[in-house]
Structure formats: structure tokens, C-alpha cells
Amino acid sequence: MRTLRDFDVKGKRVLVRCDFNIPLNEKKEITDDFRILQTLPTIKYLIEKGAKIILMSHLGRSAQNQKSKITPYHFLEKSGERQANQKFSLRPIEKHLEKLLKKKVKFLDDCIGEKVGKEVEKMRSEEIILLENLRFHKEEEENDENFAKELAKLGDIYINDAFGACHRAHASIVGVPKYRPAGTGFLLEKEINVLSKVLKNPSRPLIAIIGGVKISTKIRVIEQFLKTADHLLLGGKIFEPLLQVKEVLIGRPWLEEEIIEQVKKINLTDPKIHLPIDSLVCLPNLEEGYSRKAGIGSIRKEEEIFDIGPETIKLFSNLIKEAKMLVWSGPLGYFEREPFDGGSKAIAQAIVRNHTAFKIAGGGDTDAFLTKYNFRDKFDHVSTGGGAMLEFLSGEKLPGITALEKGESLSLRKLL
Ligand code: 3PG
Ligand code: MG
């Protein structure tokens, strides 16, 4: 697979797919610019080499994230027509990039069309254009061929630096590289290198710590780590269903019916698996301020688990000490609310105390947790991927990466 270094980009229009899907507050201020910072090496390299740089990204959730209320568009009540939601404009990112790069960035209020074409034609070396949100067009998520062609026309070379979106077979990810010479940016290259090492050639002992809320998003990575890790530590809400199917926890509602059979297949007597032995339990919705420490066998039907308990912290910390490689995805408790952040904090500290292990974290809320408690810098690699990282670590081929590999062997299609 080619990387940015393999291209002579001087004077060329380089179309870069970034993942600028970052959190914004009500005032449209960026509350965490990690993903933008991570892609700066690619952008700076292109400036240095005299390329014409065209940046594109999505912002806001994909319709493929079921039940999502934060999609970057809405439907008009009367006509049912789909309309871009300006709350998800990439404009705030233009200003932020200008600050970070100390350089002018030109923002265009669409990502395709005549006006965009003209602006791109006029570009000079080292100039930067930022296109408006790709997901304002439904054709992006539909992986529409014509939409991909329209995008491809804007560049001479296509660079994918959007690791976080590589699990999506969308037009800007898998469509464009059919038409243009394509390669990875430095961020995507780094993510692939680090995460491939976990999969194929880990330092041992390799310890994986998996938490989070929904077992459906973690089940495949759990199955994979049961094959490749030396120890698999489970916490968060996801271990409840494991105990439910083995009838250790009973009389509780099953939230994710569709994967019950898959969960049943996990062998809990596998010596690699370490489940919490105690926990912090409360009544649902934290009613009446009731809370107590409970051994796993003694949790009552009406109680809910909100964090791992002190004995589990000791057990997990002792294992973590020995690791040479650590991968962590998913908080171990309801970290947004004190005191249920205690388990995740204690485990993060145990990880940080292990000075010799290569430490990797990422996936969904993990990043939010690390940021909140200033742990991010203490890891060797914090992935910019949520779903993408989990799919990669499950051993699956990500469509965005496959598209770059294929682009090399296929002769490129003609645009017109
Ligand atoms: C993410 O935030 O994980 C990526 O930007 C992908 O977003 P998506 O899940 O909405 O496709
Ligand atoms: Mg500007």
C-alpha cells in the first residue's frame, strides 16, 4: 500500500480525506481537537512539499449508527425532504486549522459543484481549501458512484488520513480511490502499523482490557483477544450479559437480544478471561442515593452495577503489572459520575505505573475518559478510531484500507 511519501506532490492537487468528526459545544466551539492535531503531520508535509491541499471530512453521526439523533441533517416535516443541519458545518474547523497552522485556510460551503471546481482550479501551491461536510449529501453514505467521481475530480492524488472512518464504505472513503492514485496519510499509516502489531506480532504478555456499555460493539473484539491475548480483563456494563447467559445474574432484562447466541459461546472458564469479582451497585437511575459494594454472586435483582469494586481493582492491577503490551477500550464503570469513575481511574493508574509496556487505548468513550483525567499523554498510542479501531482489532478488513490496496492493483477508472 502506498503512503504519502511515495508521491511527488509538488504543484499537485492533493485531496485528503480527514476525520474531523470532533465534539462541538452549543456555541460551536471545538471542545476536543485531538483528531485535528493528529492529522497535522500530513497537512504540514503537504505544505512543505508545495502541494495544493484540499481537505474533506464528515461531521456528525452516520445513519448507520442506529437511533442516532445527532445526524448532520434533518427531514422537513411537510415534504420529508432531507436538509443539511448547519450545526454540523465544518466552518469552526477552518478557523481552528488557521490557528494551528498559522496559515490561511479557505472554506467552501459545499464539497462538490461548479463553484468548488472553479475554486480548486485557481489554487496555487501551499494553499489550503476545506470543503463543507460530506454527509450533507446523502450520496456520501450511499457510496454513490457519481458523487465519488465529483469528489475525485477535485484532486490529482487522493490521500486517506481518516482512520476513524475507514470502517465506512462511503464514497469519500472507498469510491474516490477507484479514480485517483491513492495512498495513506501519516496518521492512517501509524494507526495501521500500531494496531497490526497488536494483531499479528504483539509483545507478550499482551493484556486487553475491555469495558464499555454495549456488548454488541465489543463481542468480536472479545472473541479475537481470546485467540491472541494472554489475558483479557472485562468490566463496564458489558460483562453483565456474560454473567446473565451463564445464569450468575438472573432476573434482569436482556438488552441486546440479537447477539445472545454469540455471547453464549464465550467460554467463561477460559483461564485467559478475568471478570470482576466485586462491584459497586446501586438502584437503577441511582435512586435514593443507595449504593453498596457487592461480590458478584450477591448482587440482587433490583440492583445495577455501576463500577468495578476494590477487589477487582487489585486483581486487575496485579495482572497489568506484568504486561509488555496493553490495549484498553471502554471505561470500566459509569465514569461520568463520581464515585463510579474510581474503577477506571485506578486501572488507568495501574497501566501508567507499568513503565515497560507499550500502552494503547481507544474506541468510543475511552478517549473521553482519558481526556477528562489527563491520561492521554501517558499512553504510547491513543487511536483516533472508535468503531474503526474495534473492527480493526477484531481482525476485520476495513473497507477504507482495502480500497487503497485495491487501487494499486486495478487500473484506475476514467472519470468521464
Ligand atoms: C467516529 O466518530 O467514530 C468516526 O468519525 C466515524 O463516525 P461514524 O460512526 O458516524 O461513521
Ligand atoms: Mg479562512
Image (cartoon, helix red, strand yellow):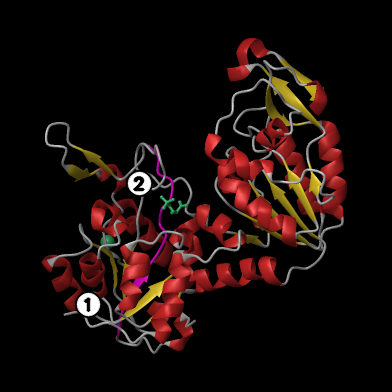
Q: Residue at x 19, y 44 (%)?
A: 83
Kind of residue at badge 1: Met
Our reading of the magenta stretch's main secondary structure is loop
Q: Secondary structure at mark 2?
A: loop
Kind of residue at badge 2: Ala
Q: What x and y, as percent, mark residue 63?
A: 35, 46
Q: Is residue 162 above or below residue 290?
A: below
The residue stretch that appears in magenta: 12-25
Q: Would you say 378 lies left or right of 163 here?
A: right
What label sits on residue 257 in the rendered view?
none
Q: Is residue 65 above or below residue 132?
A: above
Q: Residue furthest top?
A: 288
Q: Please name the residue that numbered disc 1 is placed on.
A: 123
Mark earlier in primary sequence (1, 2): 2
In depth, the one of 182 and 300 nearer the eye is 300
Examine the structure image and report whether residue 115 is included in the region drawn in magenta.
no
- Quadrant location of the C terminus? bottom left
Q: What x and y, as percent, mark residue 205?
A: 82, 62
Q: What x and y, as percent, mark residue 132?
A: 26, 57
Mark 1 or mark 2, whichever is nearer to me: 2
In depth, the one of 87 and 167 nearer the eye is 167
Q: Please name the residue that numbered disc 2 is placed on.
A: 63
Q: Would you say 64 lies left or right of 196 here?
A: left
Q: What x and y, as percent, mark residue 118?
A: 13, 72
Q: Secondary structure at mark 1?
A: loop
